[in-house]
Amino acid sequence: MIRIMICDDDPGFAAALSEKLTALASQYDDELDFKIGPIFTDGNLVLSFMDTMSFDIIFLDIDMPKMSGFELAQEITKRNPKALIIFVSAYDNFVYQSFAYSPFRFLRKLHLSEELPPAFEKAVEKCISDTQGLSFNSSEGNVTLRPSDIMYFENDRNYYCIRCENGVSYKCRGTIKSLDSIYSDKRFVKIHSGYIVNLEHVAEVIGGSEVRMKNGTVLGISQSHKTSFKEAYMQFVRRRYSR
């Protein structure tokens, strides 16, 4: 089941968004189950509710009293870092501020009819892909990981290491070159002969020659991979902040 929640201090807009999401969800076959709702108008109520239930996709208004959508996104990420946050705002200029919170998408209320369907489709695709998992034969035995759990791959002579978001690492026989199939998921990009990174876990690009991952690790981008990384990263950003 894919659980979807909405928080917007305008009950009328929130109800309209819920109706649009219900219509979009109805286009999927019965094998994919959706739960749309509840609707909240106060961020504090969202956090109280999340103590008992997690959500896969969360639509957040940004300009709200008491607790802004940005503040709420920070708290949600602490509780459920896997949730896909989609900001929905009437103010276009918020898109740049939203970068710091790594949302899955930013949608404009006045353009919801054209921007919501592709954003919803991509969010559902990601929810599905993250449940399928990737299998690896590690030194500790077979392990299956969700793509979003993997921060980066690191070459280690005749082995490669999988560095995960939770701090756990797995050592596997083989080299980075043996991971060609991983590129079917556009989140994974080679930045160096020794590194493949998950773009979702890139916190910032430093001077075009390094990336800082969300856990603070800094990895170098080789000269031969600068152009391909830049193109892949820009496409990733465009997909996330498509307007």
Image: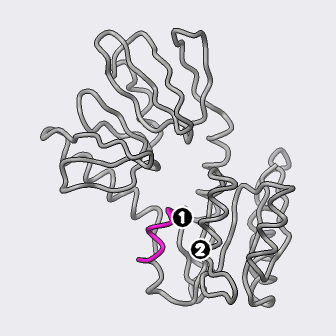
Q: Quadrant of residue 35?
A: bottom right
> Is 98 included in the stretch rendered in magenta?
yes
- Residue drawn at x 41%, y 77% as measured from the top left: 96
- Front position in the image: 86 or 170: 170
Q: Label 2 belongs to which residue?
A: 87
Left or right of 156? Residue 221 is left
Q: Label 1 belongs to which residue?
A: 103
Question: In x, y percent, where is residue 40?
Answer: 81, 77
- Residue drawn at x 34%, y 16% as measured from the top left: 175
Question: In x, y percent, where is residue 77?
Answer: 62, 58
Q: Quadrant of residue 193?
A: top left
Q: Is residue 32 above or below residue 44?
A: above
- Front position in the image: 68 or 11: 68
Residues packed near mark 2 inside 10 Å, few (<14), some (14 to 19) or many (20 plus): many
- Front position in the image: 180 or 29: 180
Q: Is residue 227 above or below residue 242?
A: above
Q: CA distance from mark 1 to mark 2?
A: 7 Å
Q: Main secondary structure of the magenta part?
A: helix
Q: Is residue 125 above or below residue 57?
A: above
- Residue drawn at x 61%, y 87% as measured from the top left: 63
Q: Secondary structure at mark 2?
A: strand
Residues packed near mark 1 inside 10 Å, few (<14), some (14 to 19) or many (20 plus): many
Q: Amino acid at mark 1?
A: Pro
Q: Amino acid at mark 2?
A: Phe
Magenta range is 96-102
Q: Earlier in the sequence, mark 1 or mark 2?
A: 2
Q: Secondary structure at mark 1?
A: loop
Left or right of 8? Residue 185 is left
Question: In x, y percent, where is residue 7?
Answer: 74, 76
Left or right of 32? Residue 206 is left
Left or right of 36? Residue 196 is left
- Contact, CB < 8 Å: mark 1 with mark 2? yes
